[in-house]
Amino acid sequence: MATDSSVQGPTIIKRKKVYKADGHHGGAWKVAYADFVTAMMAFFLLMWLLNATTEEQRKGIADYFNPTIPISRISGGGSDGLNGSSIFSEDTYAKMGTGANRKETVENPAYGDGKTKDAQDQTEDVDTLAKQAEEKQIADELQGLKESLSAESRQLSEHLMIKMSPEGIVLEITDSESTPLFPLGRSEPSETMVQLIDVVAESFAEFDNDIKIVGHTDSHRYRNGAIYDNWNLSADRANAARRLLSRADIPSDRIREVSGKADTDPLVKDDPQAAQNRRISITILTD
């Protein structure tokens, strides 16, 4: 049976819309991001370790990652090639080691006298102990002198004061209003000063240390325009004390310094005009 084309239905054309995505960029950014996160984690871990550990613990952690092995502490075996040194050289060292017989190392270098740091420290400790023993002996001697004077004459003992200084033991011979060491404004020693120096010189004969003598005054000034001032007065009084010590058989070569400081170093700082500021400081040097 023939078909009539006139009654055939309309032709339907179906169009498909295809959505195309962007091309694939690869995974390089992921690697970079992972490296960044790893670095940040390591950074915060480092910050935490620095805050939560002691110096010894941090040194132990450092040694774990970079161990100190004996081979890194010996000579490079070369002859100054590639920053090395000869194993027969005692004066030229490899970067991280020492010469053939290992008398010294980077951690324990030798000093000019051939001693290592440990040996030098031990020598310094011995010297320190010897100095302390010497200072104690001198201080005991001077304290005994003051106590003996207290028993004989309280008036004389009140003029003596003993103190420590970086240079040694300082014996302060201080003035007083009732029994002055020198006449006012003059450098001729009084009878009290002569007696004190004679007693002190006997004590100084017990040891051989050098001596430094310094004169001090109070803050009273001479009249305006006076050529002679407290600087001259303090130096002249120190020289007067030196002459008294020499007369008492103290060798002149033991006296290292004689000087005057005027009123620049008061003993009683709150009262610059106090009688105790007028004094003679005799330092038994132990440095």
Image (cartoon, rainbow, N blue to C red):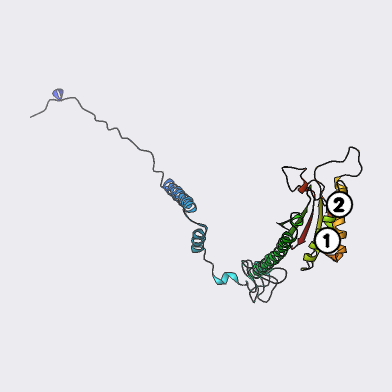
Q: Which mark is residue 235?
A: 2
On the picture, is 261 further left or further right than 92? right
On the picture, is 111 further left or further right than 209? left
**How far across and down, in percent of the image, does residue 160 sit?**
75, 56
Q: Which mark is residue 27?
A: none
Question: What is the residue that sits farthest to the left in this orientation?
Answer: 1
**How far across and down, in percent of the image, does residue 265 sit?**
77, 48
**Which quadrant, please, contains the C terminus?**
bottom right
In what element is the residue under mark 2? helix
Q: N-terminal of the two: label 2 or label 1? A: 2
Three-letter code for the amino acid on which mark 1 is drawn: Arg
Q: CA distance from mark 2 to mark 1?
A: 15 Å
**How far across and down, in percent of the image, does residue 85 sit?**
66, 71
Q: Which quadrant holds residue 104?
A: bottom right
Judging depth in this view, the residue of 75 and 224 nearest the camera is: 224
Three-letter code for the amino acid on which mark 2 is drawn: Ala
Judging depth in this view, the residue of 193 and 152 nearest the camera is: 152
On the picture, is 182 further left or further right than 59? right
Q: Which mark is residue 256?
A: 1
Q: Residues within 10 Å of mark 2 (few under 14, many from 20)?
A: many
Residue lying at 84% horizontally and 54% vertically, measured from the top left: 259
**How far across and down, in percent of the image, does residue 268 sit?**
73, 46
